[in-house]
Amino acid sequence: MARPRKTTPRVRVREDGSTVSQVHYRIPRPGLPEPIATSQSFDDHAAAIRWAELLDRVGPVEAERVLAAQLAAAPDVIMLTPWLRRHLDSLGESVEEETKRKYRSMIDHDITPFFNGEHLPVDAVTTDMNVAWVE
C-alpha cells in the first residue's frame, strides 16, 4: 500500500524581506482531463503547516473547501475543538465523569489532530471528512 504523501510548505522571501509559506499540490478541476498544479500561500508558517497536514489527510478538494470556510469565518465562528469541549461540559451529570474523561482524551488525541480542530469551523465538517477520520 502506498504511504500517504507528506506535503511540506516552502518558505519564500518577498522583496520587502517578509516571508510567505507556499503549499504546492495538484487538484482535479471540472472539465480538465488531468489534475492541475496549484498552490496556497500563507503569511503564517504554522497555518501553512496545519493546512498541508489537512491536505494530506483529506485530499485537495476537501482541504480547499475547509480553507475557504476558514477564510470566510467571522471572528465569532465556533471552531470544532472548543465546540466539542463545550458540548461535553454541557452534558452535566447525565454522563459519568470517567466517560467524559475518555471523550476529552478522544477530542485531544484523535479528533483535534486529525481535523485541525482548533482552526476548523464547526460548520466546515463534512461527511467525507468524518469518513476519512473513521478510516
Image (cartoon, helix red, strand yellow):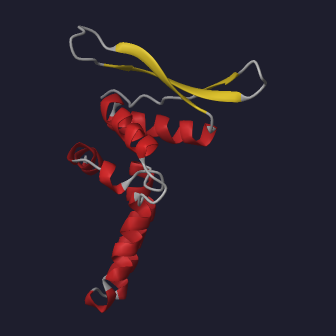
Q: Please state the horizontal and vertical placement of residue 80, each as a whole percent of the image.
A: 39, 59
Q: Please state the horizontal and vertical placement of residue 60, each as a whole percent of the image.
A: 35, 29
Give the left or right position of residue 52, taking residue 31 as reference.
right
Q: Quadrant of residue 108?
A: bottom left
Q: Nearer the viewer, residue 45 or 96?
A: 45
Quadrant including the N terminus = top left
Residue, far right: 17
Residue, far bottom: 93
Q: Please state the horizontal and vertical placement of residue 8, each as a whole percent of the image.
A: 54, 29
Q: Residue at x 62, y 39 (%)?
A: 44
Residue 86 vertical position relative to residue 72 in the rendered view, above or below: below
Q: Nearer the viewer, residue 90 or 94?
A: 90
Give the left or right position of residue 12, taking residue 56 as reference.
right
Q: Please state the horizontal and vertical placement of residue 115, each as a whole percent of the image.
A: 39, 50
Q: Residue at x 44, y 60 (%)?
A: 109
Quick check: can you spot residue 92? yes
Quick check: can you spot residue 110? no
Q: Residue at x 32, y 48 (%)?
A: 124
Q: Nearer the viewer, residue 73 or 17?
A: 73
Q: Residue at x 47, y 51 (%)?
A: 119
